[in-house]
Amino acid sequence: MSSFKGSDTYVVDAKGRVSIPSKMRKNIEPEAHLTFIVTRGLEKCLYAYPLDEWQRLEDSIRLLSPANEKDRFFARTLMQWSEEVQLDSQFRLLIPKSLLDFAEISKEVFFIGVLDHIELWKPEHFKKYLESRKETYEKVVEHVMGKTQGTDS
């Protein structure tokens, strides 16, 4: 089970390759076979799932109802944007141009480890995302962690 955490900024080369930060590399499980699935994320970022974690996500998607319009739309959209990418010998991912264009990533990429996957952001987009938050981190923590303690705020 992966446990990606932390953040870092790296350069995107002319071919669209980005190196996985070394502190995140150590969390890639052997079951991933150095393979990631990169797909469209939320808030204009990309999600990179190691293959073993992606397979868990796919298992949950298979449980969705094909008779439900929202379930179909979600599955179609997610799978349409998903690309399998093998890490090269320097632990770089070759990000498809369509995904780089979607996230507007060109010269730099901001990596965030989010437990089972890694998010890739254009640094300016992530900064704007943080600035757009209406609630403080403390208020969100109080709400989210309060729910896990059984005291839904």
Image: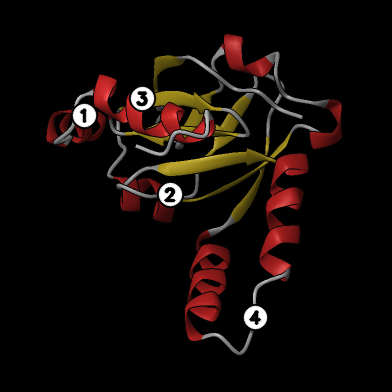
Sequence-first disc among 1 and 3: 1
Q: Nearer the viewer, residue 24 or 151?
A: 151
Residue 29 position by quadrant: top right
Q: Residue at x 31, y 47 (%)?
A: 44
Mark 2 → mark 4, Cα distance in angstroms: 22 Å
Dot 3 amino acid type: Val
Whether tag 1 and tag 2 are in contact, CB under 8 A, the answer is no
Mark 1 → mark 2, Cα distance in angstroms: 16 Å
Q: Position of residue 96 (x, y in %)?
A: 49, 49
User: Mark 2 Cα within 10 Å, few/some/many (few <14, many 20+)?
Assistant: some
Residue identified by numbered label 4: 65
Dot 2 amino acid type: Gly
Question: Residue 61, relative to residue 142: is it above or below?
Answer: below
Whether tag 4 and tag 1 are in contact, CB under 8 A, the answer is no
Could you say whether the residue bearing mark 2 is in a helix, strand or loop?
A: loop
Q: Give the quarter of the figure containing the N terminus.
A: top right
Sequence-first disc among 3 and 2: 2
